[in-house]
Image (tube, helix red, strand yellow):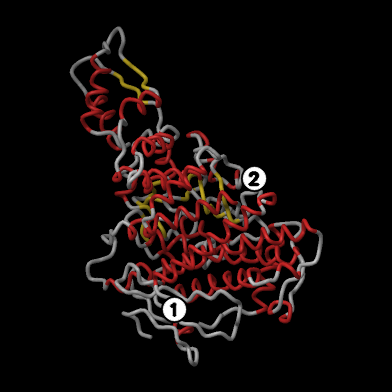
Amino acid sequence: MKYIFKIGMLSLGMLAATSCSNDFVDREFEQSVIQGDLTTVQEIQSFVRGAYVSMRSSTYYGRDYLAYGEIRSDEMFSNGGSGYYNTVRQYTMLSSDAYARDTYNQIYTMIGKTNIVINTDIAKVKGTTADIAKAEYYQGQAYALRGQGFFDLLKLYGQKYSGGTLGVVTPTKYDPKALQARSTITETEAQIESDFNKALEVMTAKAAYDTPSNKTELSLNALKVLMSRFYLYKGDYAKVRKLTDELYGKYSVVARDLYQPSFDYTLRGAAPNAIFELEVGTDSSLSTSSYNQILSYNGYKNLVVQESTLSLYATNDIRRNLITKVSGVNYLSYSTRGKYLNRTGADNIKMIRYEEVLLNGAEAELNGGDPAKALKYYKEILANRLGVVTLVRPEGTSTANLSAAIAQAVQNGASVSAATTYFTTIWNGLDAIANPSAQISVTDQINNLYPIVTLDLIKAERKKELLGEGFRQWDLLRWGDTSFKPATVDINKLAFPIPRSETDIAGSPVVANPGYDN
């Protein structure tokens, strides 16, 4: 391939990142510096932060990459509002499609910045011993970010789910003149794993510089979650289990009454479940190009929640409150309710929450591990999402309240028989005159209604917990479920087209994806 990556873009990206840190180096790097070694820890740190800036772009995690994971799924859909994502939702993309081109270019721009850091000779870095050690730590971050970039490219442009064998181009050096062919899926996966493992090795060796309390830089903990996400995709459940064990208890599931506030701008990076977020802020807000605009009733009203998804949430599930129905349409961002609420697009981009760690671990435990541990993870989430149930026995023969309580528990994952037995027993102990009501605590519900957890329950829980956060298409595909794709759409269209701007470069060895016009 040939990088679509220019010096001016790098300088602008780096200067734009000044809002993320007061000590960001506010200078331009000349071409001779970019193509040679960086020589100070400040320069290395600046390039890594420049990579974060690339990631928060609206064509990557700032909007589009999250939207792709929801538009083609069974939980949300794009209604074409304001003209956004029509080619994505209709599977009518061409090789000149702006979504395919711009996301492709943005991810490789980020990878280009990481490659400059990775290929810098640390021995040539000036400064104290501490400076050099810190430079190595940031080099480890660069490996992690490059691995994530390759993984994101593989999911979107690779042929794993469209019946082919090709992955993506995996450049490991910054060379704007290089022409490189696509790696196979196997080779791409090997490069991703190699990058993650190298990042783990380097960042562990320089752990003195690891600051997990700073949620807007990739920490060792955050790296381990990215790795668990990758191994879940590969079906390497033993590695997911190991990584989950190492992360368990370092954070906490956000409490029920803090669930909505945890998505508010004021709690950015400060919620107890926050592990890694891409910092945006008011100075670098994404404005009308933000994810908020795509989700919001007050924006483009484009990406909305399926009715079947809303019906999954019981009335005592706090997550239901984040969805607002207006004129028959379900919005995930409405005024002060939902996710990504800041109207200026200043919300941090939530890359990793602790709840994902537990869901990854639970799925892995149910695939060759310990079902009891999976149940523990599952219950930790339920215990912080469900509310008290009140049974009221009226005079007469009506059992409507009992039936509603049973149905609610089934929505929350209990079996019909367990819910019926449990609530009927309590109901039979009530008296319409002397003792007409009972409040059943969340703890009692958890202890009595959920003796086991199944893969189907975990799949449903991922849907309910991670709604709108860009996971669903990739979850469905790795489970072998393509039911979200219209039957008339060719399976080749599950992969985005390789942009014509890439395949049309003179002498380019990059092969297009089948089913497209290049």
Q: Residues within 10 Å of mark 1 (few under 14, many from 20)?
A: some
Residue 203 falls in image quadrant: bottom right
Q: Amino acid at mark 2?
A: Ser
Classify mark 2: helix, strand or loop.
Answer: loop
**Circle 2 residue:** 213
Q: Residue at x 56, y 74 (%)?
A: 172
Q: Residues within 10 Å of mark 2 (few under 14, many from 20)?
A: few
Q: Position of residue 268 (x, y in %)?
A: 60, 47
* Residue 497's disc number: none
Q: Quadrant of the C terminus?
A: bottom left
The residue lying furthest to the bottom in this view is 506
* Residue 182's disc number: 1
Up-down: is 36 above or below 45?
A: below
Q: Position of residue 446 (x, y in %)?
A: 36, 28
Up-down: is 151 above or below 435?
A: below
Q: Position of residue 406 (x, y in %)?
A: 26, 29
Classify mark 1: helix, strand or loop.
Answer: loop
Residue 285 falls in image quadrant: bottom right
Q: CA distance from mark 2 to mark 1?
A: 38 Å
State the residue in front, 282 or 123. Answer: 123
So how many labels did they put on this image? 2
- Sequence-first tag of 2 and 1: 1
Of badges 2 and 1, nearer the viewer stands: 1
Q: Amino acid at mark 1?
A: Arg
